[in-house]
Each structure stands twice: as structure tokens, then as C-alpha cells.
DNA sequence: CCGAATTTGTTCTTAATTTGAACAAATGTG
DNA sequence: CACATTTGTTCAAATTAAGAACAAATTCGG
């Protein structure tokens, strides 16, 4: 039951039903392809004439194409329809603290080419670097298809209205406009998003499960920072000023260490990669001090994971504690939002087999109902490049979105 | 950007635009009444012929009525339209630990009659008591109008599909079906909802601000329990199994007291009425022990509030600490959901002038951006009966809801 | 091999609603 | 009293859904 906003409503017009049905049909093709007109008519409970008309429009505008006919037990062989994805390309950019990833992919998120370089932290210089590399990448792969836009993912809060990065502590950015600068420099439209939301968008729009893709879930990223992308009813929850999702800053101990954000005892201070490394090194979490030690030792989270698996007890104990705190944080999400499922991303998912039993135990204790305690938690390996696929989704997904009315 | 659910979509038909526009018009009348057809046409950017047609339908089905004409500077005097509310009545029921409130109101939430009685905790007996009182109440006020349904608010989790109360610790209920039992016993349709969500619905649908009514907010109730109703984009967030909103069970101290839910250090164990009373009595929060002491002493939260205002330092200190913890909890909500505003309900809002500065200070420290820190917090006095008005909204609001498509 | 049955895809007609123009009613002003 | 203005109603045209009819393309059984 949704309330109409009488200051900002979208009236229905004569073309509204057609737009709605065309989008429904397009999504059905995308999730059930290859599919015939007759099958579409059955699934939509409309006449085949209606489907023919809508399909004609989509063929004309290039969203779908006709493939082959397939054998049928009787009657005329149906002509199968597909969504055009292979020749519609996206430049996906993932900016992280140390490395920037640049991928050319198609509308499915299938990678075509991947480059990586050390992050240029100065915004103008980063834009210049991207503006040099992107045309070159596209030229190299010009035969594959045409670029439809650039998706850019950053580790910070993004204002979707202005495209400005409000705050990205890992990069030292505050109120920075890279979206419009990159659009001007490359001539492509650029969409920008924060990392957990981008990962959530990838799961929703480019997941492998088609029609069973999740529409009510939380994507938690445990990495340099800890944050979440929240999706309710098939739509990302951004919040009034675009700053929702900061589950990393839920305080779980009033006497805990001081977090990067300035508060004490944040979930992030217990569960981020830096927190796990601090614990392994045997001292309290301190962003600046721990970073310094790590730079000197060259130790990474992947090292600790490997050591834990090899029997290093200190490493195992460090991970165990991370799992316990992560369990508390996920229980908070389960109790406050009650998602259908939770995705967990970040380097530590490589040790999911070790983390999951601990997390499960904490959740069993803290979730308010047994059904809530059974919320599926699905790790996503870093090797599936969730942020880059999220960047792709930023560009590809809008053509499939439900029309807005009322 | 919302994803279409291809397993459960609602196709548009020929009548879809008309239904959408009728609902938009109805909401415009409700929020701008009295209003003329011409004015509606201007606000909707449609021809006056269209409005005449939609208004005819709404006049015929009894949703609106014509009032008087009003003076205009020139031309024909316009005929003003109103939503019918005064003669459309609702039985609103608020079941609490100690008292049950029963109100007859109109569709605006304007009270006509109010009764209260000691809560009969046994579900069948409660239904029988209500089934006896409701017809009597309606008979007494039969001349006012006709009853359109019953709204029932309980302090626990409700499954909206089956209408069952999953868990209401204050009442000792688990998996209880009072909705269908009450519907059978009275012959009216019954809608049931948990308390924080009902309060949120009241704010959204029956608030005093008409078109400026909130659509992205959180309603926090601080009472016997602590919970929240979350509203995103004009729609309540219930969660996958209808258990979202349990912000009272965010753990803020791992060594904190054991909560009613079994976990340690929950926000509720620091901020509920029982927590404040425990603190005032000088011992650690313990639901059973503290209840016992309170039953013996007859002390209530209202007593402590009055004592704090009268200079009782122990009472003031108890409230101060409650405010500090509530600040932490509200900062969690601000960081994780970034609502446009937060409503706070419960008895302690009587002391809002004392609580607010403390809460503000904690939030200023913990919110991640200064804009988020400035999130308006609006206390709602218990004397405006938010739960009862929420019960009214359960019945009245659906006729104004946006149609569902795609 | 052919007629019948079945399925897919296309075309066409009808019905419902939006869109916009024209008209009717009801005012105020000079 | 004529004209201008505003509100409200009626009507015709345009667009789209809905459904029927038809065309094309098959398989099967006699």
C-alpha cells in the first residue's frame, strides 16, 4: 500500500499501459530467453496480436532481436527472441584505495577486457587518466560493439542528483564531482554509485538467477570499509540525502576503539580488513597506525586468510573474532530490515567456510525469530568482480526498469 | 529504478491509466479540499472533460461529495469537492500490556468515542470482550455513520498474509490468530498491525500536513518495548517475514543487561520505560525483577518524568542516561536508513525538552554527515493516540493507495 | 500423398479511455 | 446589455487493449 506523492506524481496517459507492458515483456525476454511471441502472450495473459505489436517496437528500437526457430511437437515452429546484449558495451570503473579497475563488458556484464592501475587519488588526475585509457580501450575493441555509457563505482557516499561524491574517506574525497568531469572528458554518459549499492545492483540486475534474482536483500561489503546496499521491493534504498546503508557505523561497544568516522566501537572497527589485520598484529584497531605498520610489513588480508588456513593460530583467532562481530552486525540487519537474503562481499569471503559457522551461531542467538535466523547468507567471491559488474548494471539496467507512475 | 518481478507482475490493461488518475485525483481532493474541478485539472495537467468524468465516478461511488460554490474574482463560481470522511467510521483497537483502548472514529481519525478496559490477555477472551463492546459502541453512535471496518494494533510482530500475531512478548502471545476470529465474531473486516508500523501509517495517512505528509521516515516507539516503523518512498518496510523494524534489539553493549529477547545489551534494555524505571530504582535492568518491584511500588514512567521535572536528581539522571542511549539508537537509524525525518512516540516524549538536547549532542557526534545529523526529530505526545489513529489508518488508507502495476 | 489438426504469427475490428475542441452556464465589468 | 472570463459538460478524434479471424507453417494418421 503506497501513498501517492501529490507534490510529485506522474499522471497516467494513453501510452502508460503500453509502456508498462513493453517493459514487462522486455524483462520476460531477458529472463526467459530464448522465448517466442506465443509464450510471451501466455505468460502475460494477453492476445498474440498485442505481443506482435510490442515485439515490433522492441525489434525496431534494437532492444531485442530474432534468433532461430526451434522445433515444436506440432504446428508452426516458433521464432525465438533475444535481448541484445553482446554488442552493447559498457565501460565499468571501480576506484579503490590502492587500485583502480577498468573493465569493458557487454550488457550482461560479461567481461571483454580488464585493466588495472594504481589509483590516482587526486580527482582531476584520475579523470585525466581514465579519459586517456577509455578511448584506447574502446578503439582496441571497436569491432565488438558500441559503448552505451560509463559506470563508475567509488567507496563513498554519492549524491545521485548532482553526481557528486559527498564523502569517500578511503580516497580522502569530500564533495567531489568526477561524474560530470568524466562525462565531459569522454563524451559518454556516466553513472556513479557507491560500492555496496553497486554490488547490490549487480546482484539484482546481472545475477545468474534471472527471474529468481533477489528483490529484497542486503549486500554487505567487508573490505577496507564496511557498508551495505539495501534493496526493498526491487529498488535500492538510498535515503533522503543519499547516505543510507552505513551499517559499518553501528556502534556495538561503547568502549570500543575509535573508528575512521570518529565514533567509538563501530562495527567497522571490528570487522573491516584493517580490523582483522590489527587483531592479527596484536594491537587495538587504529586506522592510521595500523596502516603504517601494514605498509612497512607488506601484510595483506589475503596473507592472514592463507595463514589461518595453514594452521596459524593467531590468524585463525583473528578471523574467529571478526566472524563473531560480523555475526552481530548481520543479526542487526536481520532484526531491523528482515531481508529475504544477505549477500556478503569482500576478501574475507575466501574463508567463508571458517566464518559461516561462527556467524550462524551468533545469529541464531540474536535473531528474534527462528525464521529470521534462517535468512540465507550468500558469500560472493572477490573474483566475480561484484563492483565492476555493479558499474555495468548502472548503465545497462535502466532500459529494463519499471516505468514510474502515480 | 525499480526491477520488475517477472514471477509476480501486474500487467497494465485499458483501465490502468484511468485507475491511476482516479487515485491521484482522490488524493488531491483529500489533501487540498475544498477544491474545484478546474483546479484539479490544472494540478493534474489534464482537460476539464477528463476531470468531470473521473469526478462523476467518485461522486457515484461515494468517495467524494459536492459542497458549496465559492466566490471567484470572475466567471462562473466553482463547485467545491470534498472527500467523504465524517460518516465513514472505523473501530480502532489498541491492545497494550495493561490496558486496551477502543475508539470509534471517522476516516480522518477524528475521535467520536473512546473506551478503555484492562487487557484480557487470553486471546479468545479478548476477542469475546471486543465482540461484545464493538456492536454496543456502534449502536450508540449509529446516527453518525456506517462502520467500514476494524483496525487492530498489537505490540508484536504480525504476519500480514495470514493475519497471525507471530510474537508479542508483552502479551505472552505466539502464533495467535485474533484477526480472523474478530472478523468472524463481528462481521466486519479486520486489519491488524504492529504498533510502530501503525504509528507510522498514522503519520503518513492521517497526519495534519496533507500533501506535506512524510513518505520517507522512521517512527520510533519508546514504551514497554522499543521498535520502529520504517517508511521508504511512501510504503512501509515490513521485511521478508514481516519482522522488520526491531531497532530495539540492536545491541549497543556486549556486556549489557539481558533483554526480554534473550540477547545482551539491546537498545531496548537501555531505553524502554522499564529500563528508565530500573535505572531510577538503582539496579540493573531485569524485566521480571523490575516488573515485580514496580507492581509492588506502583511506580510508573509518568511518575519518574514528573519527579525529574520537579528537581529529583535521580529521576533526572535516569532520564539523561535514557536520552544518551536513545541518541545512539537514533544515530544508528540515521546512518543506516537516512530518513527524511524521525518521529518519536511513547510516554517519554512528555520530557522531550529535557531529552532532545542530549539526543542531539549524541547524534551530532555519531552521524556521518552534518546533513544527516540535522535530520528532524519530531516527538509525538501520547495524548494524540498515535496507535489508535494508526488503527484507523489501517482501514481508511487503502482507498487512497496508489494502484499497483508492473 | 493429402486432409485434418495444431501451433505460431499477423491483421483487422471493436471497445475503452485520453485528448482536446466546442459548447453551455454562470458570473463580473464597463 | 454586450463582452470577457471562468467553470463545467458534451462530443469527436486518436491511441491502445482486447479479441476474433485469418494466414502460414508445421505434424500426423489414414
Image (cartoon, coloured by chain):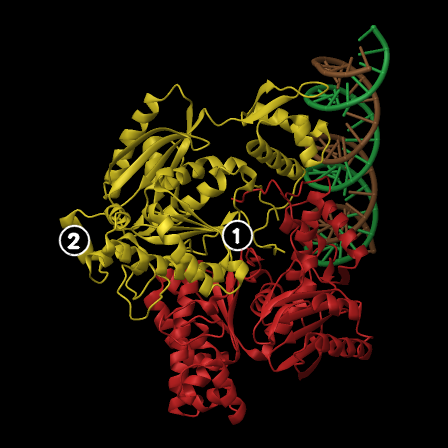
Chain colours: A red, B yellow, C brown, D green
Q: Where is residue B278 in the image (x, y as percent from the top left)?
A: 22, 57
> Can you say whether B131 is above or below B338 in the image?
above
Which residue matches tag 2?
B292
Q: Position of residue A278 (x, y in %)?
A: 44, 85
> Can you say whether B394 is above or below A276 in the image?
above
Q: Where is residue A384 in the image (x, y as percent from the top left)?
A: 59, 77
Q: In the visual, does A330 lie left or right of B404?
A: left
Which of the two residues, B167 or A263, is positioned nearer the viewer here?
A263
User: What is the number of the mark on residue B62?
Assistant: none
Q: Position of residue A205 (x, y in %)?
A: 62, 63
The residue depicted at 75 percent of the width and 77 percent of the height is A128
* Circle 2 SS class: helix
- Does any portion of residue B160 appear in the rendered image? no
Quadrant showing the C terminus of chain A: top right
Q: In the visual, does A71 lie left or right of A279?
A: right
Chain identity of mark 1: B
Q: How far apart are marks 2 and 1 (CA)?
A: 40 Å
Chain identity of mark 2: B
- Does any portion of residue B192 appear in the rendered image? yes
Q: Quadrant of residue A325?
A: bottom left
Label 2 or label 1, whichever lies nearer to me, is 1
Which residue matches tag 1?
B340
Q: In the visual, does A379 lie left or right of A254?
A: right
Local crowd size for mark 2, using a 10 Å CA cut-off: few (<14), some (14–19), many (≥20): few
Which of the two residues, A124 or B356, is positioned nearer the viewer here?
B356
* Circle 1 SS class: loop
Amino acid at each position: 500500500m503506497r501513498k501517492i506523492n501529490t507534490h510529485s506524481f506522474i499522471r497516467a496517459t494513453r501510452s502508460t499501459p503500453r509502456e508498462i507492458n513493453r517493459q514487462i515483456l522486455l524483462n520476460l525476454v531477458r529472463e526467459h530467453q530464448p522465448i517466442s511471441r506465443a509464450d510471451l502472450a501466455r505468460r502475460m495473459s494477453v492476445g498474440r496480436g498485442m505481443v506482435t505489436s510490442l515485439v515490433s517496437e522492441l525489434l525496431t528500437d534494437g532492444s531485442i532481436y530474432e534468433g532461430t526457430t526451434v522445433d515444436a511437437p506440432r504446428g508452426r515452429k516458433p521464432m525465438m527472441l533475444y535481448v541484445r546484449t553482446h554488442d552493447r558495451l559498457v565501460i565499468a570503473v571501480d576506484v579503490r584505495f590502492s587500485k583502480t579497475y577498468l573493465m569493458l563488458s557487454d550488457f550482461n556484464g560479461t567481461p571483454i577486457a580488464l585493466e588495472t592501475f594504481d589509483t590516482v587519488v587526486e580527482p582531476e588526475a584520475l579523470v585525466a587518466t581514465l579519459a586517456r585509457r577509455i578511448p584506447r580501450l574502446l578503439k582496441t575493441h571497436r569491432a565488438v560493439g558500441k559503448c552505451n555509457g560509463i559506470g563508475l563505482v567509488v567507496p563513498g557516499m554519492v549524491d545521485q542528483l548532482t553526481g557528486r561524491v559527498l564523502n569517500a574517506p578511503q580516497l580522502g574525497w569530500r564533495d567531489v564531482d568526477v561524474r560530470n568531469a568524466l562525462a565531459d572528458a569522454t563524451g559518454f554518459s556516466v553513472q556513479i554509485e557507491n560500492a555496496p549499492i553497486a554490488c547490490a545492483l549487480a546482484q539484482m540486475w546481472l545475477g545468474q538467477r534471472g527471474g529468481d534474482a533477489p528483490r529484497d536483500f542486503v549486500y554487505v561489503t567487508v573490505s577496507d570499509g564496511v557498508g551495505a546496499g539495501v534493496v526493498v521491493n526491487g529498488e535500492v534504498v538510498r535515503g533522503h540525502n543519499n547516505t543510507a546503508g552505513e551499517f559499518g557505523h553501528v556502534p556495538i561497544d561503547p568502549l570500543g576503539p575509535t573508528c575512521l568516522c570518529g565514533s567509538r566501537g563501530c562495527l567497522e572497527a571490528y570487522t573491516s580488513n584493517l580490523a582483522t589485520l590489527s587483531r592479527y598484529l596484536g594491537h587495538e584497531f587504529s586506522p592510521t597506525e595500523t596502516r603504517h605498520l601494514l605498509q612497512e610489513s607488506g601484510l595483506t588480508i589475503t596473507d592472514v586468510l592463507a595463514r589461518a588456513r595453514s594452521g596459524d593460530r593467531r590468524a585463525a583467532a583473528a578471523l574467529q573474532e571478526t566472524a563473531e562481530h560480523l555475526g552481530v552486525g548481520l543479526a542487526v540487519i536481520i532484526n531491523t530490515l528482515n531481508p529475504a537474503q544477505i549477500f556478503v562481499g569482500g576478501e574475507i569471503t575466501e574463508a567463508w567456510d571458517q566464518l559461516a559457522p561462527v556467524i550462524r551461531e551468533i545469529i541464531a542467538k540474536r535473531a528474534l525469530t527462528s525464521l529470521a535466523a534462517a535468512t540465507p547468507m550468500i558469500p560472493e567471491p572477490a573474483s566475480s568482480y561484484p563492483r565492476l559488474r555493479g558499474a555495468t548494471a548502472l548503465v545497462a539496467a535502466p532500459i529494463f526498469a519499471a516505468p514510474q507512475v502515480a
